[in-house]
Image: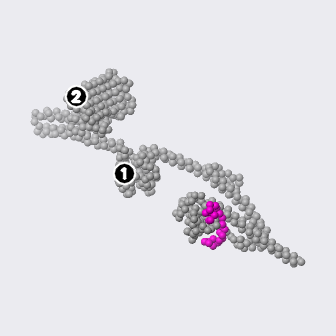
């Protein structure tokens, strides 16, 4: 009986132990599958579309996941990239999890891998937006990890069953389940909150996770501050560049523009995301870009002169466009001045030297010496006049003497009378129409200079037997007009008539044209006083200079 009871009890115990072992093996295996599914879902959270676009592949993601198998598949289930070797271009469309993912739903599957030869659990997810990579278009992402079979689980549990019996197994399973429920779940919830929260503060009710929450909040605030600083720096940089009067372009090649400001956009006719045609169509500039050596070229755009300066860096070219219209105009004026003054001075000096040498050598007839001396004096006066004009022009800027009221009516009458001999010589009809008592705030010598230059020009460039009229009208804004019936001005002359050393008559023979300084002095005096100065002229019919004695901007 005892033995029977013993044997029955032993058999029941053995059967009970076996059943409990099988039961707990099954429970443990299912729990392992569920844990693996959760783990795979966490792994899937590490998949970063930006990283894939940046060139990272399945092997790099697998390494990040501790060796889990990662597979990228296209819309037909064909392998584009796999962390396991020998799986490329293989079709997995018949796999359970792939079929479900192709149908639009995520899926798990457990089976023995044909590639790896071991039991695996797979988790496959379709992408909402496919990603393009070098191998093709990624539509599905599958992550797999090794998983023990029920047989291996049971085999592994036999020593434990024999030593600790069924209770130990139950306690271990219970403990594992408790740990899973009390630790993993809060961390998952915390991770979800941190991932979904945008711009707010991360909070947690678990004290153990508070240091992590504080660290993440600090990092978020630091990133926000840096992002705001970068946005402000970009705004200031764009403001500075767009405010520059110089054009600046930074580019890798004419089709890859990195930076361009508004000035350069306007000058080069540039549209965003378009190549710089102005650089590719210019042969000289094209050769500079080919040579990749710093160089400068001048170009005329919209009637203005610009300097294109190219500087080459390691990865880009910097083009600086500078408006050099004024400097080039000044250079041209300077060259014209040198040529003009040289010629003006050379003619009388040659004459003076020639007569002086004849007199010195005693080769001059006695009856001609007086005429020679007269010519020497005449040419000396011309040189002195030229020097006085140049000094007078430069002295205007340094004149700080105070202004006072000048009777322009009286001054016009006085100046007009001094030109009677010259008027009779060219048989010019001179007429004045002067309002009495017209006064302006200036200096007598300045107004005399203006009147003398305008009347002198009206005589010099008038026709033989022509007419010259000086009109002065009073009122709130007095107006002076000097009108002649002379040779008139061409369109080119109109734009340059007030430039220094520019003359309409290029003869330089001392009989027709002046030195090209008179109207420059008039313009400078009018601008200094704030008076308006305009010119009206028609080639072959005459010219009129009009001065408006007001405190508006002069020409």
Q: Nearer the viewer, residue 428 or 109?
A: 109
Residue under the point 35% across and 48% down: 299
Q: Residue furthest right?
A: 1
Quadrant placement of the C terminus = top left
Q: Residue furthest front?
A: 103
Q: Nearer the viewer, residue 332 or 181?
A: 181
- Left or right, 360 with respect to 433, comes to left
Examine the rendered structure and indicate whether residue 80 appears above or below residue 454: below
Where is residue 221? Give x, y as percent.
61, 50
Q: Which residue is mark 2?
A: 428
Where is residue 368? Give x, y as percent.
12, 34
Q: Secondary structure at mark 2?
A: loop
Whether 107 is among the magenta residues is yes
Whether 274 is among the magenta residues is no
Is residue 64 visible to us here?
no
- Left or right, 536 with respect to 427, comes to right
Examine the rendered structure and indicate whether residue 221 appears above or below residue 177: above
Q: Residue furthest top?
A: 436
Cα distance in 3D space between marks 1 and 2: 54 Å
- Left or right, 506 with respect to 169, comes to left
Q: Which residue is mark 1?
A: 296
Instruction: Please give the range of residues in magenta.
Output: 98-122
Mark whose residue sits in front, 1 or 2: 2
Number of other residues with Cα within 10 Å of mark 1, as a class: few under 14, some 14 to 19, many 20 or more: some
Where is residue 392? Give x, y as percent.
30, 33
Residue under the point 13% across and 39% down: 358
């Amino acid at each position: 009986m005892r033995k029977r009871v013993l044997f029955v009890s032993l058999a029941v115990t053995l059967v009970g132990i076996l059943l409990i072992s099988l039961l707990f093996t099954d429970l443990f295996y299912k729990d392992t599958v569920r844990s693996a599914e959760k783990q795979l879902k966490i792994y899937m959270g590490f998949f970063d579309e930006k990283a894939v676009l940046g060139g990272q592949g399945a092997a790099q993601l697998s390494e990040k996941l501790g060796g889990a198998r990662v597979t990228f598949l296209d819309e037909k289930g064909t392998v584009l990239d796999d962390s396991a070797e020998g799986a490329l271009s293989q079709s997995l469309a018949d796999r359970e999890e792939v079929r479900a993912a192709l149908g639009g739903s995520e899926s798990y599957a457990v089976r023995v891998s044909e590639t790896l030869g071991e039991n695996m659990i797979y988790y496959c997810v379709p992408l909402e937006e496919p990603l393009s990579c070098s191998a093709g278009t990624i539509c599905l992402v599958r992550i797999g990890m090794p998983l023990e079979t029920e047989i291996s689980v049971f085999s592994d549990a036999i020593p434990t069953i024999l030593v600790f019996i069924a209770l130990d197994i139950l306690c271990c399973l219970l403990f594992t389940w408790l740990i899973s429920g009390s630790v993993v779940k809060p961390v998952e919830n915390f991770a979800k909150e941190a991932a979904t929260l945008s711009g707010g503060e991360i909070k947690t009710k678990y004290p153990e996770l508070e240091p992590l929450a504080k660290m993440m909040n600090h990092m978020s605030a630091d990133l926000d501050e840096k992002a705001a600083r970068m946005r402000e720096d970009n705004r200031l940089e764009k403001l500075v560049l767009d405010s520059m009067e110089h054009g600046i372009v930074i580019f890798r090649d004419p089709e890859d523009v990195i930076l361009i400001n508004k000035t350069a956009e306007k000058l080069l006719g540039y549209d965003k995301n378009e190549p710089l045609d102005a650089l590719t169509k210019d042969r000289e500039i094209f050769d500079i870009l080919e040579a990749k050596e710093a160089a400068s070229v001048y170009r005329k755009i919209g009637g203005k002169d610009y300097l294109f300066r190219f500087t080459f860096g390691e990865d880009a070219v910097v083009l600086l466009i500078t408006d050099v219209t004024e400097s080039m105009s000044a250079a041209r004026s300077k060259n014209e001045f040198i040529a003009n003054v040289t010629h003006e001075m050379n003619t009388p000096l040659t004459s003076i030297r020639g007569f002086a040498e004849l007199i010195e050598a005693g080769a001059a007839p006695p009856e001609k010496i007086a005429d020679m001396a007269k010519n020497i004096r005449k040419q000396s006066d011309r040189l002195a006049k030229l020097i006085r004009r140049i000094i007078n022009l430069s002295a205007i800027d340094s004149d700080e003497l105070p202004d006072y009221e000048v009777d322009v009516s009286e001054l016009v009458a006085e100046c007009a009378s001094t030109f009677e001999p010259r008027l009779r010589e060219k048989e010019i009809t001179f007429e004045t129409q002067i309002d009495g008592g017209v006064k302006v705030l200036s200096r007598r010598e300045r107004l005399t200079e203006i009147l003398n230059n305008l009347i002198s020009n009206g005589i010099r460039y008038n026709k033989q037997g022509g007419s010259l009229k000086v009109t002065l009208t009073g009122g709130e804004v007095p107006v002076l007009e000097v009108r002649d019936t002379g040779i008139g001005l061409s369109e080119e002359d109109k734009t340059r008539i007030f430039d220094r050393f520019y003359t309409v008559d290029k003869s330089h023979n001392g009989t027709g044209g002046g030195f090209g300084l008179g109207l420059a002095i008039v313009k400078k005096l009018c601008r200094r006083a704030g008076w308006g100065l305009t010119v009206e002229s028609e080639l072959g019919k005459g010219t009129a200079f009009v001065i408006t004695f007001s405190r508006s901007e002069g020409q």
